[in-house]
């Protein structure tokens, strides 16, 4: 039976016949003609696997490279693994914490050792030594007792994350006697790591990744410091008021029946921050709010409107989508498709004219945009005629709100620019933080499905394109914001898990998006489900909870 031949189809008219159950993907690479240099993993019949996967039946196989989103995740995770291995080999007593990203690079805190140029040089040399040694990185299945013993022998406190026994056995990676988990796939051996660098950053180390398009060249850009400062403030304040840094600590609150208090305190903390923000904008006439998809712009804008009304102001929320050009005259991208996220799809001249007229006391008719008419068409209605009065404040929300061409002509004394983003502070352990991008995708899948009738596969399909648009139209202007506001709630992933698990399970294994759905499911595995009963209807999170919120969703 084991000698039966199977056929493995690699596409591009290349296939192999091999013995069933005798070969791993890694073993047959030398037999292939067209293998990319930057392979991170492979897909077998659209399901993601490591390069150590043993082929047991006829299948279609495709390689996952660094240029793909999952390839970049595997590369980043593997680079962290090698960094931690190097640190462990240099000094077992060193404590490492990996915080938020600075731009696309990892911000790492190190204690029990003096971090200076010389120490960073030693760590980098050790990493290069590990990479040059081409050590295999092998996934091993171990029991609950074994994983506890492994971490204790290493003097690691990361065992706390396994203390709530979820399974009979666990996967852990072994590289030349160094063990770690890191909650996801790694490259098959250390030589797969190419470009990286280490630099001092504040009191710690910046672990720098390659460029998006070239695995061998380090991306030297550090995009934003304001995001770093906001993350730090939120991280320390949430930890101080909730006592939660890790997922197992959140689960303890759920299992200990104290999650209701956490929800109330977290909501009160966000409301307090909103009140403080309201006080800063009371003397402004124009507020510009920007943020990437599923950051909560709609609810945030209406909540700010509510607090401004409570302060005696008369705010008007206007979506900047109303100033889109008609679809018939919209720009196209390099593939000839309509680019509705381009700044060229936004009628800058009309927007400028109306803002200038309003600020000078003139009456204007603010347009509405009919997305269903001719693919998208601007309309004017008399009831939208508006004149700015003494207590009026205009609140504009949209992806282009921070773009200089949209607002830089407004007197700085009259305008306030806000960037909102859900920066996740919760970690699986000291090395692995739940991705803010993945949280936004989860939020969007739920909202798209329940509010817009969009299938899960379609949301996943267009997500990479959405993120590319954000990199082009939103992220370059974050530093221009007067304020960055974190819209993440410490408890929210446990709530969203209850809504998204069944949606992800609906994605069948014949779908091109099956592996991504399974990846998201695995991320949520360690969370306990949290009820929505204690969440107030004006919570920003309710924008992403079906039939829960009191504000209009868009």
Image: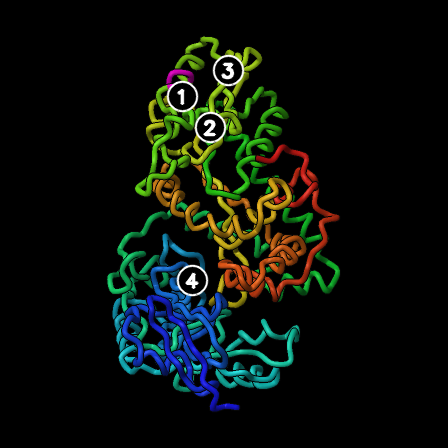
Q: Magenta span has 353?
A: yes
Residue at position x 48%, y 68% from top?
45
- Mark 3 nearby-residue class (10 Å; few <14, some 14–19, many ≥20): few
| Measured Cα–Cα span from mark 4 to mark 2 | 33 Å
| Measured Cα–Cα span from mark 4 to mark 1 | 39 Å
Residue at position x 31%, y 73% from top?
123
Q: Earlier in the sequence, mark 1 or mark 3?
A: 1
Depth-wise, is mark 4 or mark 2 nearer the camera? 4
Q: Quadrant of residue 96?
A: bottom left
- Residue 77: x, y in percent? 42, 68
Q: Quadrant of residue 358?
A: top left
Q: Earlier in the sequence, mark 4 or mark 3?
A: 4
**Residue denoted by label 4:** 70
As rendered, which of 27 and 265 lies closer to the eye? 27
**Residue denoted by label 3:** 380
Depth-wise, is mark 1 or mark 3 nearer the camera? 3
Q: Earlier in the sequence, mark 4 or mark 2?
A: 4
Main secondary structure type of the part rendered in magenta:
helix
**Residue denoted by label 1:** 351
Answer yes or no: do the residues labelled 1 and 2 have beta carbons within 8 Å?
yes
| Measured Cα–Cα span from mark 4 to mark 3 | 45 Å
* Label tally: 4
Find numbered disc 4 in the image and state the secondary structure of the residue it sits on: helix
- Mark 4 nearby-residue class (10 Å; few <14, some 14–19, many ≥20): some
Image height of 140 relative to 312, above or below: below
Query: Which disc, if any, is residue 416?
Result: none
**Residue denoted by label 2:** 320
């Amino acid at each position: 039976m084991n000698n039966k031949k199977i056929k493995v189809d690699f596409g591009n008219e290349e296939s192999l016949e091999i013995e069933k159950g005798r070969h791993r993907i890694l073993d047959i690479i030398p037999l292939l003609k067209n293998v990319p240099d930057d392979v991170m993993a492979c897909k077998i019949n659209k399901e993601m696997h490591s390069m150590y996967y043993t082929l047991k039946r006829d299948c279609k196989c495709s390689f996952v490279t660094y240029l793909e989103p999952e390839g970049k995740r595997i590369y980043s995770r593997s680079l962290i693994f090698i960094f931690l291995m190097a640190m462990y080999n240099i000094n077992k007593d060193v404590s490492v914490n990996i915080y938020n990203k600075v731009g696309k690079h990892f911000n790492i805190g190190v204690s029990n050792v003096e971090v200076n140029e010389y120490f960073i040089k030693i760590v980098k040399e050790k990493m290069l030594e590990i990479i040059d040694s081409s050590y295999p990185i092998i996934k091993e299945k171990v029991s609950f007792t074994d994983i506890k013993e492994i971490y204790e022998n290493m003097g690691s406190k990361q065992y706390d994350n396994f203390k709530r026994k979820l399974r009979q056995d666990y996967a852990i990676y072994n590289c030349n006697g160094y063990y770690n988990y890191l909650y996801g796939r790694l490259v098959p051996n250390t030589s797969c790591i190419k470009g990286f660098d280490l630099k001092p950053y504040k009191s710690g180390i910046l672990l720098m990744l390659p460029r998006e398009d070239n695995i061998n060249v380090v991306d030297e850009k550090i995009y934003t410091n304001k995001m770093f400062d906001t993350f730090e403030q939120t991280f320390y304040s949430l930890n101080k008021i909730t006592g939660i840094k890790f997922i197992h600590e959140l689960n303890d609150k759920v299992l200990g029946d104290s999650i209701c208090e956490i929800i109330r305190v977290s909501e009160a903390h966000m409301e307090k921050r909103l009140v403080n923000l309201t006080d800063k904008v009371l003397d402004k006439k124009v507020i510009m709010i920007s943020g990437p998809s599923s950051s909560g712009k709609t609810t945030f804008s209406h909540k700010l409107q509510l607090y401004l009304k409570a302060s005696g102001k008369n705010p008007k929320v206007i979506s900047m989508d109303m100033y889109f050009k008609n679809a018939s005259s919209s720009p196209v991208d390099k593939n000839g498709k309509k680019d509705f996220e381009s700044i060229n799809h936004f009628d800058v001249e009309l927007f400028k004219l109306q803002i200038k007229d309003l600020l000078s006391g003139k009456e204007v008719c603010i347009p509405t945009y009919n997305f269903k008419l001719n693919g998208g068409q601007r309309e004017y209605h008399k009831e939208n005629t508006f004149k700015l009065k003494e207590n009026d404040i205009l609140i504009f929300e949209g992806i282009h709100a921070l773009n200089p061409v949209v607002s830089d002509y407004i007197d700085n004394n009259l305008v306030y620019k806000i960037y909102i983003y859900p920066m996740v502070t919760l970690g699986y352990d000291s090395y692995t933080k739940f991705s803010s991008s993945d949280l936004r995708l989860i939020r969007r899948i739920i909202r798209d499905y329940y509010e817009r009738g969009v299938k899960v596969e379609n949301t996943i399909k267009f997500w990479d394109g959405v993120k590319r648009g954000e990199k082009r139209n939103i992220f370059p202007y974050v530093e221009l914001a007067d304020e960055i506001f974190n819209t993440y709630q410490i408890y929210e992933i446990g709530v969203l898990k209850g809504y998204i698990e069944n949606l992800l399970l609906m994605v069948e294994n014949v779908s091109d998006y099956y592996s991504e759905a399974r990846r998201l499911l695995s991320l949520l595995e360690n969370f306990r489900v949290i009820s929505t009963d204690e969440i107030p209807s004006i919570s920003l999170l309710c924008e992403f909870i079906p039939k829960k919120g009191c504000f209009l969703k868009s």
